[in-house]
Image (cartoon, rainbow, N blue to C red):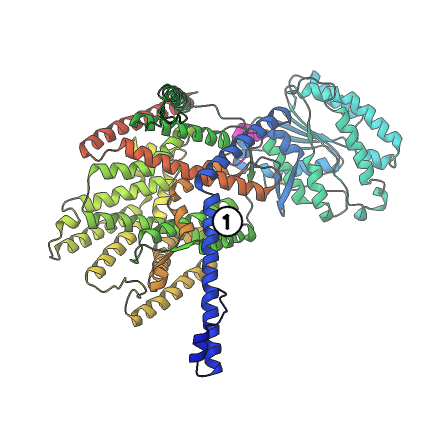
Amino acid sequence: MDGNATNPATEQKSPTWGGSLRARLSHGCHGGAKMAAQAYAMGRREINQHFNIRNAKLLAIGFVLILTAGHGIHRMYGGGDSCEWLLSSGRFLGENVWQPNGCMMHKYKISEVKSCLMNKYITFIGDSRIRQLFYSFIKIISSGVKEEGNKHENISFKDGKNPLKVDFLWYPEVNNSMRDCFKAWIEDTQQKPHIIVVGAATWSIKIQNGSMEALAQYRINLTSIAPLLEKLAETKDIYWILQDPVYEDLLSENRKMITNQRIGLYNDAALSILNSSTRNMAAKVKIFRASKLIAEETMAGSLDGLHLPETTRDINAMILMNSYCNKIVKPIDGSCCLPLAPLSLIQKLTGCFFSICIIGCLVVTYFCHTWQRSKPNANVESGEEKKLVTASLSTPEKLLFSLSKLGLIMGYFFLCDRADLFMKEQKYYTHSTFFIPLVYIIVLGVFYNDNTKETTMLNREQTDEWKGWMQLIILIYHISGASTFLPVYMHIRVLVAAYLFQTGYGHFSYFWKSGEYGISRICQILFRLNFLVVVLCLVMNRPYQFYYFVPLVTFWFMVIYGTLGIWPQTGKKDENGSCSPYWEVVFKLLGLLLCICLLSASQSSFENAFSLWPISKLFEWQGFLHEWWFRWKLDRFAVLHGMFFAFLYGALKKSHLISEGKGETLFTPRMSSFLLFTSVVVFLTYSIWCASCKNKAECNEHHPYFSVLQILSFVLIRNIPGYVRSVYSSFFAWFGKISLELFICQYHIWLAADTKGILVLIPGSPVLNIIISTFIFVLVAHEISQITNDLVQITIPKDNYVALKRMLCVAIFLFGILALSSFEQMNKQLK
């Protein structure tokens, strides 16, 4: 029936025409709302029917196989040298931020440069443009250098504190004088430069007024020089700088003949001559094309139309530094020209283990399939076709199958962030790259909403939702590089504190309600928290502290367990109606607060507490405990706040001071209104304070004390209104259930270079690349979550005695891994 149709009986009973109209409108509104609700439900069912998790994972596997094959073919036949990408192609991400095609540049510090160029001799040869590049290069070494001296003479630079020499040789034309210089270096065994940067052409155009005869002579001279350059390139790094374009409108009258058309002809000549005679690809002159591309974008900022703006030549100097020094310094955030790290012994053993699991799984699957074919279950009398019997997997088979899947997934991790297969690009923050995706996920979160099973405060669906949207925001924060924007950085710090707050709240609530301190449950929690990180430490050759959040949560879980589990144990079994259990908890929380304050008072005391091997090995990063100290201190009160909130909530609930019925406000109407208003004000005030903060150091100093205010404000805003408490976003809750896996997996298969860059699966299309890589990344995290759950069921029994024995076996295994890692590290230091 039409929603706007009228009921004749209703019309007859209506005393007036106005009453009839009101009835029609009311019926129409209710009918329209009902149709909208039906359409919404049908739309969700349609999406869920055709796009379920199983089909999505099959699609993700297809993407991985196709992309892996495509990148492998490109590397094999299409020229997959990241050094060549660095020197020949790229684009501007923003003002003065150059992105080479497919690899990441490192911004070198003075200490790194001096370490790389110690005992090196670098020479720049050419005209005034090369002289500009020379000055930009030595300013990276010593920032106080000024551009002084005769412009048309040789210039020498020596670092007084380091055996390092950089020369500029004035050879504005490619002629016999330049040729004699190279010939002398070949014949001289003592004074050969380690790096030679050369380029010239504009003087030839200017002196000969752009004649074609000058171009022909340029070809002849360069042809005679090319074999000498290639001979030097066998043992040295030779860079030929292509001629940058000019800004013709700004050129003076005596330079008007230097046109971009003529520069293009000279560049074509250089490209056709250099490296044409050599067959050894390892010994070739490196063509610096990127300078030309950069100048095309920035030449409008030139002062005279010929010479490059300072920022442009600074980029060129940094490209040269990356080209030569990356293979020596091996920076984490510089993937251009970075050689592959050799596999450690632990990585080799881990690879062998997973390979055996995969082969074993294939063998078992083959024999099971053969056995099923030989044991058909057929109904002979009815003539039905034979059907295969699907035998349920035994526990060892489930274990083997889970480890095999995990091994294949770890292979993908390794290909993404340790092998030289997929491209990587650096991050660049803009407000749109952070806030536009944020709006998208908010819309999706609102679209997918459901009623909660229970209306208690911080119920399971709500906490999953909370974890989910926080994790999605953190992911957007990481991939957009938003840490450079201080207000966003501070709000993300609050989200991390909120995770720890939930850790304190959740574990305290469980122990308080159940009083269960059995070894089995403890082992299960520790296994779920640490399993993926331990595997990644073995596969990716990274220390435990690198995945800082998991050590942090694990540490605080053990603190909660120790605080509540020591005599007298806190929990349900101790409650006898008296107040003593509450006072015991208060004293324990105050004792924990005192311990935290004492540890945070002195960094040296804190580090001494964690300096004993093998504990120090777990919490060290690059040989120091400073990173662990920083992470611990930043949110040192968050877990305690969560524990205290859980205690207070339990006390209020026991005293019947909280109403958690469906549609009811949490407190009395007047108190609820007051707390809701106060929470909104505090929430906004904290955000305003974050925006006014001057620097990260100042903000981080106040963060441990103030972050709890915004967390509590959110909790009250989310739970005081009854209707808001009774609904949740199933979209966010889905991500919340795999939030730990999402946080850890992002390090290597969504981000790249240990989170310093972005993984590039689809080159040349940033938006499509983010869509595809995110799709694969989320499904991998979901699959790892399922594998972890399966392995927990298999490896951690409910029997406390058996669980304790297996825990000791795991501890011995991890002890052996730490010992092997320490031994391997000592060998490297001795070498």
The residue carrying pointer 1 sits among few (fewer than 14), some (14 to 19) or many (20 or more) residues within 10 Å by Cα, namely many
Q: Is residue 459 above or below residue 769?
A: below
Of 103 and 726, the residue lying toward us = 726
Image side of residue 565 versus residue 141, left or right: left
Residue 699 in view (yes/no): yes
Kindly identify which residue carries mark 1: 482
Residue 296, image x and y in percent?
Answer: 72, 42
For the point 35% across and 54% down, which residue is it? Answer: 462
Residue 746 in view (yes/no): no
User: Which segment is the magenta one?
Assistant: 324-339
For the point 34% across and 34% down, which residue is it? Answer: 531
The answer to if 329 sits in the magenta stretch is yes
Image side of residue 408 versus residue 308, left or right: left
Q: Is residue 420 above or below residue 650?
A: above
Q: Which residue in the rendered view is the most extreme toward the bottom? A: 16
Q: Of helix, strand and loop, which mostly describes the magenta segment?
A: loop
Q: Is residue 758 above or below residue 74?
A: below
